[in-house]
Amino acid sequence: MIPDCTSRKGVGFQDCDDPEWFGGKISFRGSIKYENSKFKIVLDPPELGTSDRFARAFGSKSRITLKASSTRGCTKEILLPFLKRPFVIWDVVYRAFLEDDGTVFLIATNEVLDNTTERIDPTKKEPSRMDFMTFINWHNPLHLNPKQVTRRTVFYVNY
């Protein structure tokens, strides 16, 4: 089920006079570093920028944009297994999809981390977020155009 984003308080565009309200204009960015055969995600400080459809619908914190430019000596065969795993940032589980230009988007999912086992708990879901495949269908409903070229965006799903 795709959420009704217009009725969610604190997300997206709202007619709001609060000077602390940014309406999806906060950008979370970072980079993927590959050093000594290990990956590291380095987050930049949040920046105030322009809003977009995704940030207005789900909130700025639901997407982190990473550049994979600092991965010298790393092939796609090495990078892809790293990107297939879930990422937990700010107690939120993110999944990745990759654009051809080396940009990786981490998308907040409804998965929940069990802090005692440090594993995804398949019996629990975060109701304010959608699962990864529902997000993909919201973002680009493949069933509406099954002949489209999907080469530009490569999706990684590890379920």
Image (tube, rainbow, N blue to C red):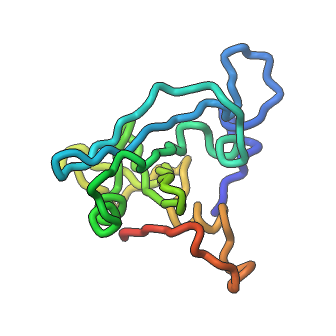
Residue 93 or residue 146, whichever sits in front: 146
Residue 149 or residue 144, whichever sits in front: 149
Count of marks, rendered view? 0
Q: Is residue 72 left or right of residue 68?
A: left
User: Quarter of the image holding residue 121?
Assistant: bottom left
Residue 62 image position (x, y, % from top left): 54, 43
Quadrant showing the N terminus: bottom right
User: Quarter of the image holding residue 158?
Assistant: bottom left
Q: Residue at x 80, y 17 (%)?
A: 17
Q: Residue at x 31, y 64 (%)?
A: 75
Vertical position of residue 37 compared to residue 60: above or below = below
Residue sticking out furthest to the top: 19
Residue sticking out furthest to the bottom: 147
Residue 86 image position (x, y, % from top left): 34, 55
Q: Is residue 64 left or right of residue 24?
A: left
Vertical position of residue 113 compared to residue 159: above or below = above
Quadrant showing the C terminus: bottom left
Residue 57 or residue 33, whichever sits in front: 33
Residue sticking out furthest to the right: 15
Q: Residue at x 18, y 52 (%)?
A: 37
Vertical position of residue 108 compared to residue 12: above or below = below
Residue 68 image position (x, y, % from top left): 41, 50
Residue sticking out furthest to the front: 73
Q: Is residue 106 left or right of residue 114?
A: right
